[in-house]
Amino acid sequence: MASNAQGSHVKALLVEDASVEILFHSAILRMFHSETTVAKTGKEAVDLFLEGEKFDIVLCEKEMPVMNGLEAVEKIRAIGETDVKIVGVSVDCNAMEAFMSAGADVFVPKPITLDVLSAIIQEIINKKNNAMV
């Protein structure tokens, strides 16, 4: 697990095992000054929540070793994490129903575009700003 703290508005968890995807998604998240933590398996992601870590957004790939993204989303929701925005991502466009059934808030097919991720992050920032008022 790696962390890239950039003095952020949004704390993000990137659950992805492919190095190229990690670099790509991390670069987009850095554009929003997000503090990004990377988990390379669904189990690592669940363990972070069990250790008390809190995130504003989780970008979760479907296919990973040890524990897949669908199982991770189910377990994260089962431990009571309802405030975090979970975004299921996959090259499999048919994964949307499975992610939504598992408890994801949104499904985005890969490749994730800057416009799509920007809209999701802006929604989180707006929600956080409204909660502070």
Image (cartoon, helix red, strand yellow):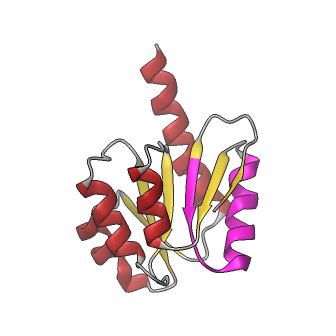
The image position of residue 67, as x and y in percent, is 41, 78
Looking at the rendered structure, the number of numbered marks drawn on it comes to: 0
The image position of residue 28, as x and y in percent, is 71, 57
Q: Residue at x 28, y 75 (%)?
A: 97
Q: Quadrant of residue 98?
A: bottom left
Left or right, 104 with respect to 125, comes to left
- What's the magenta bit mostly, secondary-structure-wise? helix
Considering every residue shown, the one lying at the far top of the view is: 133
Q: Residue at x 35, y 64 (%)?
A: 73
Q: Quadrant of the N terminus?
A: bottom right
Is 90 placed above or below 116 here? Answer: below
Considering every residue shown, the one lying at the far front of the view is: 51
Camera-nearest residue between 129 and 3: 3
Q: Residue at x 70, y 44 (%)?
A: 32
Camera-nearest residue between 76 and 110: 76
Is 15 placed above or below 131 here? Answer: below
Camera-nearest residue between 28 and 35: 35
Is 84 placed above or below 115 here? Answer: above
The image position of residue 12, as x and y in percent, is 57, 50
Q: Residue at x 43, y 69 (%)?
A: 43
Q: Is residue 77 magenta?
A: no
Left or right, 120 with respect to 20, comes to left
Is 29 placed above or below 93 here? Answer: above
Left or right, 95 with respect to 53, comes to left
Q: Is residue 29 magenta?
A: yes
Residue extent of the magenta highlight: 12-31
The image position of residue 9, as x and y in percent, is 63, 34
